[in-house]
Amino acid sequence: MPVSRHSCWTNMHERRRQMAADQPSFPTSIHLSTPNAIRMNRALRMSRRDMLLGAMGAAAVVLGAGRGIAATPEAEDTVAPLFLALSHRLTDRDALDARISSALYARIVKATPARRDQIQKLHDLMAGGKFDSARELAKAAEHADPVFKDVIHDIMTAWYRGVADEKVVVYRSALMFDITKDAIYPKTYAAGGPFYWTQTPPEVAVPTGEPALSPSKFVVEPT
């Protein structure tokens, strides 16, 4: 029985359609796409994937919280707020960043775990007396227990230099830059105008205070 031309054309079209379905799916205009467009398409696909993974992770956290997952040790640490209160008194400042305080405290305790109990005891000493300045607290603390001198050194070094556990925790927010911000900029880039360093810096009053703690051994740090 002869096969009609229409039947042959239909069968050929069907085979081509099946072959196309078995091939990987690419945009028909990929040969016309620029490299930037191809990278953008890939980035969009990755973004959608990341959004899905992020949503799944958030759902897991919510479900876990509902089932009573234990909080991290950092979240349960009740000494961290005491560290901030001590820092307010020792720096004689009413405004300190609580996030920076938590980061500095975590590093100090990580370097020397005994500091946690020592910070709590130093706070108890502060709470049990009336100290109107950092100087008064520092003198009373060293008299009460010589180890408090090292605790105070750690706290002050952390806040003023931004360094704890021999790690830089903060840089531009270190209090040493806040003291001289009207004359000296943090060493990142030149924040003044051309040749600003040739201008006469503003005068700074000569300190008249006396040290509250006993002298410490001078340590030359490597540069």
Image (cartoon, grey):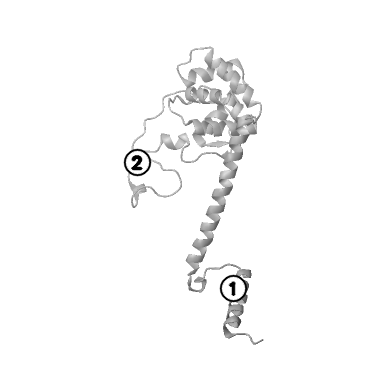
Q: Quadrant of residue 118?
A: top right
Q: Earlier in the sequence, mark 2 or mark 1?
A: 1
Q: Residue furthest bottom?
A: 2
Tag 1 residue: 17
Q: Quadrant of residue 11?
A: bottom right
The secondary structure type at the circle numbered 1 is helix
Q: Which amino acid is tagged 2?
A: Pro
Quadrant where the image shows the C terminus = top right
Q: Residue furthest top?
A: 129
Quadrant where the image shows the N terminus = bottom right
Q: CA distance from mark 2 to mark 1?
A: 80 Å
Q: Residue at x 58, y 19 (%)?
A: 122
Q: Residue at x 48, y 65 (%)?
A: 37
Where residue 71 sits: x, y (%)?
Answer: 62, 30
The secondary structure type at the circle numbered 2 is loop
Q: Quadrant of residue 106?
A: top right
Q: Residue at x 41, y 25 (%)?
A: 208
Residue 155 appears in view? yes
Q: Which amino acid is tagged 1?
A: Arg
Frontmost residue, 54 versus 77: 54
Residue 221 appears in view? no
Task: Determine crowd level at label 1: few under 14, some 14-19, many 20+ residues with C-alpha closer than 10 A.
Answer: few
Where residue 77 sits: x, y (%)?
Answer: 60, 26
Where residue 155 sits: x, y (%)?
Answer: 55, 29
Residue 201 shows which numbered tag?
2
